[in-house]
Image: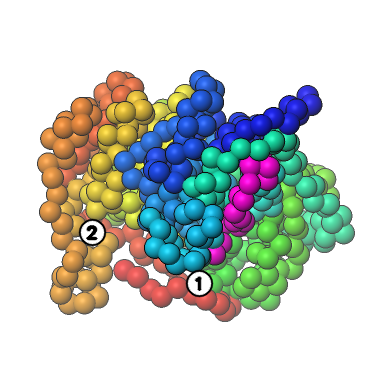
Amino acid sequence: MSAPAPAVMTTGEAVVASLRAHGIDTLYALPGVHNDALFDAAQRAGDGFRVLHPRHEQTSAYMALGAALATGRPQACAAVPGPGMLNTAAALLTAYGMGAPVLALAGQVPSFAIDRGFGHLHELPDQLGLMRHMTKFAARIRAPQEASALVAEALAAATAGRPRPVALECAIDTWAARGTVALADPRPAPAVPIDAEAVRRAAAILSRAERPLIVVGAGALEAGPELLRLAERLEAPVSSFRRGRGAIPTAHRLAVSFTEGHRLWREADAVLAVGTRLYWQQSNWGVDAGLPIVRIDADPEEPARFRAPAVALLGDAAALLRALIAELPAGARPSRAQELAALRTWFEERLARLAPQMGFLRAIRAALPDDGIFVEDVTQLGFVSRLAWPVGGPRLYLSPGYQDTLGWGYGAALGAQAARPDRPVVAVCGDGGFMYQAAELATAMRHNLPVVAVVFDDGAFGNVRRIQQEQFGNRLIASDLANPDFVRFADSFGVRSWRATTPEQLEAALRAALAARAPGLVHVPVGAMPSPWDMILLPRVRGTGEGARPPLP
């Protein structure tokens, strides 16, 4: 299909048309005078394009992030310059750490005044330079004629290699400027040639191994079938944590948790790392000469960040896994069923110590359909879910990654729901994190986004309080919270709400909330919970490590 003929349009119209040409039909954004011409273009774009406006710029970016994570496709948000752009910064930084393709559109002061310090409304010195610190690509649209090409360039950068956020800024007068625009076609992702010799060396390492271990991150989410075939060919357990969960179903016989992976690490004789920084393993668990590591990654800078791997395979994970499978010898390998059964028994015994969290997680899992999306905020239930939440497939478990951004969860869940209206979405939040975006209950109602928030309320920043209790002689400071009555608070927005104090009550309330297909909130008052950190911050078990993070409780 040929591109449309060049036409006279505003910069705002060119950007909206270009977003649509790239399959983006939603803009998560708050209006403001600097972006009026962009919003007018969106309004006139017709029924095939929508603007979802939250109550805070941070939420617009979190919604775009949640939508990107739930779909694997680029999403867009917009904000006015200065304060508005800065309000999106935490979400953009989180997207950068998580490898999420979010396009941020930022307004600017009049073009003649940029970076001249005149004191224009919302002026921010070197806004473009600031955006470059938290994005993969950032540029300024200077005229309508270059708008479409810059959108295409930005989205190509967002999706090529390792996905990451990108940004474009546009001055208030440039948004409204008119010119003859030729819409740019989407740019296909460049094909990365497979290094056949490196594949053969990697296959030789893995085929010799008697106790191989596979570790996966978010870069493996689109390579599930290939990953499963390779794991079964090697009889290799597959360990995941946070972003990699769901690359293969966690119920599969070879799927193991992060904690179980630590137990296997000490005796592994080869590791295949797919789409993961392998940070915890290399920095904390330790490596030695007896542990050859094969890295598969789309980012050429990643494999050697801590130490040079035995083999680095660069490119698309699915294609490289297929190439590896073709080089591996056929035939059954000795079963590890007995070993893994014993490991699971040990792990379940350890999880049993986390009785309140596990009981509540089982209740949520029983109520949420298998294809439902679970969003974990930074909270006690969230920490345990990284180890124990059953995940049946990719993009059903959304976690904030290494930024661990407190308060991201509800906004991200709204975006996930907007992008995947066919699936139920549950956000598991603590009282501290939920209040970061609690006013967005209004957004759920305004746009009919039937996310159910489950708010676990211990009246504190619970992890902070535990650290103060255990490491600082119970000298508590700035950790206790004054909370609203969450049920009445939700009711005031027209949001259906329940209160549950037991796992059984939570399951019943969540079933009712999900059946309503309307915004909902379940308030769960809780006390102090046992710490899961001894199952996450695990000791070195071999060799040396670099860049280890300091101990926490």
The type of colouring in the image is rainbow
Side of 176 where 508 appears, left or right: left
Question: In the rendered image, is residue 265 in sight?
Answer: yes
Q: Nearer the viewer, residue 273 or 185?
A: 185
Q: Secondary structure at mark 2?
A: loop
Q: Considering the image in quadrants, where does the C terminus appear?
A: bottom left
Q: Residue 86's x, y, as percent?
A: 41, 57
Which label is found at residue 329? none
Q: Say above or below: 236 vs 516.
A: below
Q: Considering the image in quadrants, where does the N terminus appear?
A: top right
Q: Nearer the viewer, residue 441 or 310?
A: 441
Residue shown at the point (38%, 73%) measured from the top left:
551
Instruction: Kindly identify which residue carries mark 1.
Output: 284
Residue shown at the point (75%, 41%) measured from the top left:
188
Q: Say above or below: 110 vs 478.
A: above
Residue shown at the point (56%, 46%) measured from the top left:
174
In the image, what residue type sits under mark 1?
Asn
Q: Quadrant of residue 223?
A: top right
Residue shown at the point (20%, 27%) measured from the top left:
494
* Residue neighbourhood size for the residue with mark 1, other residues' Cα within 10 Å, grouped as few (<14), some (14–19), many (≥20): many
Side of 341 where 336 appears, left or right: right
In the image, what residue type sits under mark 2?
Phe
Q: Which segment did they paint magenta?
A: 129-148
Instruction: Kindly identify which residue carries mark 2.
Output: 461
Q: Is residue 106 magenta?
A: no
